[in-house]
Image (tube, helix red, strand yellow):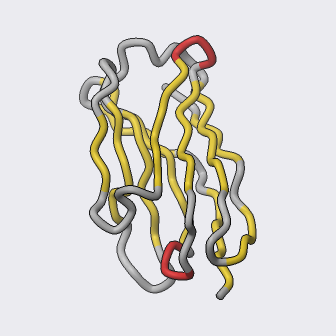
Amino acid sequence: QVQLVESGGGLVQAGGSLRLSCAASRSIFSINPMGWYRQPPGKQRELVARITSNGNTNYADSVKGRFTISRDNAKNTVYLQMNSLKPEDTAVYYCFLSLGPSFYWGQGTQVTVSS
């Protein structure tokens, strides 16, 4: 069992930045992959970014060039740096990790971007 705790969400104006953090309750050194999904109001959950244990990253087309995912294995934490935020980035952001046959989610953190 793994617990994931997100932080860093909030309200920001368009063009602003936020950094989300996801702290895991165990070592993430070998966990592959980890990342972030988001669920906009009234829409399905979608993948935002993911990072493998060797640091390879993938991004949704809608966030490429604006968002950066990173991981600090020493702190058991994954980050999502979000720059040039747009109103369409408004969503609940969920951290996830895949561990063997299991998939774990955080509780979600709200990001609201005002125009």
Image quadrant occupied by the C terminus:
bottom right
Q: Residue at x 49, y 27 (%)?
A: 71
31 relative to 81, above or below: above
| Residue 38, quarter of picture | bottom left
Residue occupying the far right of the picture? 11
| Residue 18, quarter of picture | bottom right
Q: Residue at x 35, y 74 (%)?
A: 44
Query: How many labels sit on residues?
Result: 0
x, y percentage for residue 36? 44, 49
Left or right of 65 in this view: 101:
left
65 relative to 91, above or below: above
| Residue 35, quarter of picture | top left
Left or right of 2 in this view: 50:
left
Q: Residue at x 60, y 51 (%)?
A: 107
Left or right of 59 in this view: 8:
right
Which of 46/63 is in front?
63
x, y percentage for residue 33? 32, 31
